[in-house]
């Protein structure tokens, strides 16, 4: 059995506490003091001392994983599914490893959208300068020119990006469960133009610039001896700060800052931007939305901001486990009435498929998704069922 460094550090304290607690009332003060000491110890920081370097591969091959013919992620040598606890008792390191793999999978899904689904990557803002932060969406060739129907897909919140429903399902189940790709292919086969939104790509991260403090000796009229003393104190302070930083951050993780993307700084902003610059300008007479989880909230916000335009162009909306709230979002009566006629929200339920489910909100009908496991793990309801939504099969 392996014992981590953090456990060895805390072991004497725990033993001491146990011994004190066996004593009488006179020992209560010492117990309180030790508890206070424990509360001040940052276990997360202590755990970093045991960690191997946070240096992970940047390809699936480097991780020794690949997707098989069934779209399942498997180890190249053993054929086993992905193992999260690669190193025992190092949860933070395992989580960082999982996140690094997730970023590779995000890029892999982007490649599939372009190669397998023949979608185009479109940079936004459309008038962005060379130097400003940018995001992107994906569109089929006929997304803006298809005269009949256009399908718009919006995923939920979190780490997922364009083309994904749930990263965890991609890693632990398969590509069909966790991505929008089967849905996109069926939409294209049935004659839809397609636009895939990317509502979580709201900013880029850059390393924080280091702040250089100008030495007081550079511009001071103080006597030389006093300046020397000040500089000595400053150097000692910096030495202590560097020592503390080395203890606090032994992995030397970079300090990052976020630069938000113009007019796309949130999922709601992103939905409105894509509507104004793409969907509203499309030739399609019938526009259909499929929005999962927070994507449903983003759609309702779009309706609030562009009510007349949405009503004029959108034919039907299929929501899956949507987290919208017409009261909190202050959706007006006319919006709620339109949603009752044109929207349907498939939700987690043990009832048979499409059975009506009671709702506390006066908006769109809620019906059972039946496949509780799939919906609860953040994949949309059975894709065929959404395509049967009463107005999606338009001519």
Image (cartoon, rainbow, N blue to C red):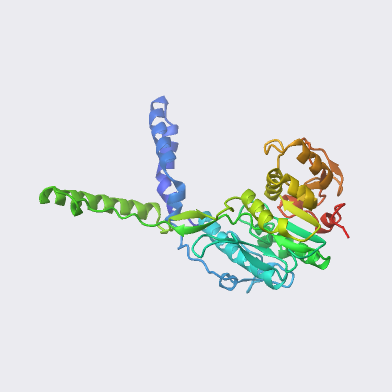
Residue 108: x and y in percent read 63, 68
Of residue 244 and residue 232, the one placed in the foreground of this image is 232
User: In x, y percent, where is residue 131?
Assistant: 49, 63
Residue 240 as seen in the image, left or right of residue 75: left
- Residue 275 in the image: x percent, y percent? 69, 54
Which sits in the foreground, 50 or 325?
325
Is residue 179 visible to the viewer in this orientation of the structure? Answer: no
Residue 36: % across, % down = 41, 35
Q: Is residue 278 left or right of residue 354?
A: left
- Name the foreground residue: 157 vs 368: 157
* Residue 146, image quadrant: bottom right
Q: Quadrant of the C terminus?
A: bottom right
Residue 183 visible in image: yes
Q: Residue at x 55, y 57 (%)?
A: 95
Residue visible at 41% across and 28% down in the picture? 28
Look at 21% across and 49% down and name the residue there.
Answer: 233
Say whether residue 357 is left or right of residue 223. right
Q: Quadrant of residue 139?
A: bottom right
> Residue at point 80% right, 45% down?
349
> Where 119 falls versus 354 (above or below)?
below
């Amino acid at each position: 059995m392996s014992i981590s460094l953090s456990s060895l550090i805390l072991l004497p304290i725990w033993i001491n506490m146990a011994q004190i607690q066996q004593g009488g009332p006179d020992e209560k003060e010492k117990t309180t003091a030790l508890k206070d000491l424990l509360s001040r110890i940052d276990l997360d920081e202590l755990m970093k001392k045991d960690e191997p370097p946070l240096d992970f591969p940047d390809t699936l091959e480097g991780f020794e994983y690949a997707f098989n013919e069934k779209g399942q992620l498997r180890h190249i040598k053993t054929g086993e599914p992905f193992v999260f606890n690669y190193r025992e008792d190092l949860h933070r390191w395992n989580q960082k490893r999982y996140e690094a793999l997730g970023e590779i999978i995000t890029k892999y899904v982007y490649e599939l959208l372009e190669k397998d689904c023949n979608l185009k990557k479109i940079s936004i803002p459309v008038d962005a300068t060379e130097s400003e932060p940018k995001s992107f969406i994906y569109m089929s060739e006929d997304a803006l020119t298809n005269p009949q129907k256009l399908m718009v897909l919006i995923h939920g919140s979190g780490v997922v990006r364009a083309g994904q429903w749930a990263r965890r399902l991609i890693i632990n189940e398969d590509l069909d469960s966790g991505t929008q790709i089967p849905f996109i292919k069926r939409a294209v086969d049935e004659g839809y133009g397609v636009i895939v939104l990317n509502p979580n790509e709201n900013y880029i991260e850059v390393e924080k610039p280091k702040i250089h403090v100008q030495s007081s000796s550079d511009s001071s009229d103080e006597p030389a001896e006093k300046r020397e003393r000040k500089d000595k104190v400053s150097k000692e302070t910096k030495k202590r700060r560097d020592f503390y930083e080395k203890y606090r951050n032994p992995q030397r993780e970079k300090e990052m800052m976020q630069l938000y993307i113009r007019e796309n700084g949130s999922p709601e902003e992103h939905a409105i931007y894509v509507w104004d610059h793409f969907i509203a300008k499309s030739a399609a007479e019938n526009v259909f939305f499929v929005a999962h989880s927070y994507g449903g909230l983003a759609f309702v916000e779009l309706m609030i901001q562009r009510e007349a335009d949405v009503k004029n162009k959108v034919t039907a909306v299929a929501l899956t486990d949507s987290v919208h709230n017409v009261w909190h979002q202050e959706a007006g009566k006319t919006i709620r009435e339109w949603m009752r006629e044109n929207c349907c929200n498939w939700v987690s339920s043990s009832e048979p498929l499409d059975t009506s489910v009671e709702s506390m909100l006066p908006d769109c009908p809620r019906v059972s998704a039946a496949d509780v496991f799939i919906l609860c793990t953040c994949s949309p309801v059975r894709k065929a069922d959404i395509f049967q939504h009463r107005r999606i099969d338009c001519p």
